[in-house]
Image (spheres, helix red, strand yellow):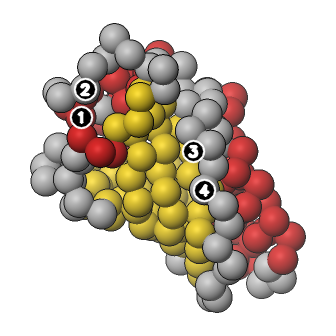
Amino acid sequence: METRTRVPTPDPDTGPEGLLGRLRAERQRVDDPERVAVLDVLLTHLEAELVTLDLEATVSTLVADPVYRFYGVGGAMPDINGLDAVRDLYRRQFAGGARQTAGMTPDHVFVSADGVMLEGELRMRGEHVIATFPELVRDVDVSRPFCLVKRCVSILPVRDGKMTGERFYFDGPYRPEDVRYLD
């Protein structure tokens, strides 16, 4: 694993292209078959989750008992355990029109045979936040278009060719300054 060069933070309107482009470039660079396989699973998952909004293709990349955890947000985002709960998360996300509404251009990408770690700035458009994590918008004027911006580290572990879940480590609880109004 190695640290990659810092890249510019995307515009708030940027969707998943920065993340997918970075991972595709990493896949071309990597020559270890185990790490290529990990990147292939992750790319398949993210393209289904963020571009095609294909629920079955998204969950087909997961183990039977995935766990999604969100650290550093003061309990504002509860853990999501099990395939049914994860499926419900994606169902809400897709109903909110997730396409082009969430993205991360990683500053750093680390790939091993066990998964991928990304470090960067996660940006979620308001409609994505409202649909997927409504508990985060208590103090947000949802009548205005907005983007939620947080620094985070995301760990995406893989076992036997399937993702075991997602773990996000945020730079602290959501604060008013994390909301960027777009009007």
Q: Is residue 169 left or right of residue 74?
A: right
Sequence-first disc among 3 and 4: 4
Sequence-first disc among 3 and 2: 3
Name the amino acid, label 4: Thr
**Which residue is the site of mark 3?**
103
Residue placed at 17% from the left, 27% from the top? 138
Instruction: Mark 4: give few (<14), some (14-19) or many (20+) Cα within 10 Å.
Output: some
**Which residue is the site of mark 2?**
140
Sequence-first disc among 2 and 4: 4
Q: Residue 54: x and y, percent?
A: 62, 28
Residue at mark 3 to residue at mark 4: CA–CA distance: 10 Å
Instruction: Mark 1: give few (<14), some (14-19) or many (20+) Cα within 10 Å.
Output: some
Residue at mark 3 to residue at mark 2: CA–CA distance: 20 Å
Residue placed at 60% from the left, 56% from the top? 9
**Which residue is the site of mark 4?**
9
Q: Residue 20: x and y, percent?
A: 71, 52
Nearest the eye: 182 or 14:
182
Nearest the eye: 121 or 49:
121
**Which residue is the site of mark 1?**
136
Foreground disc of the pair 1, 4: 4
Quadrant assignment for the N terminus: bottom right
Image quadrant in which you'd find residue 143: top left
Name the amino acid, label 2: Val
Q: Secondary structure at mark 3?
A: strand
Disc 3 + disc 2, Cβ < 8 Å? no
> As displayed, is residue 153 above or below residue 13?
below
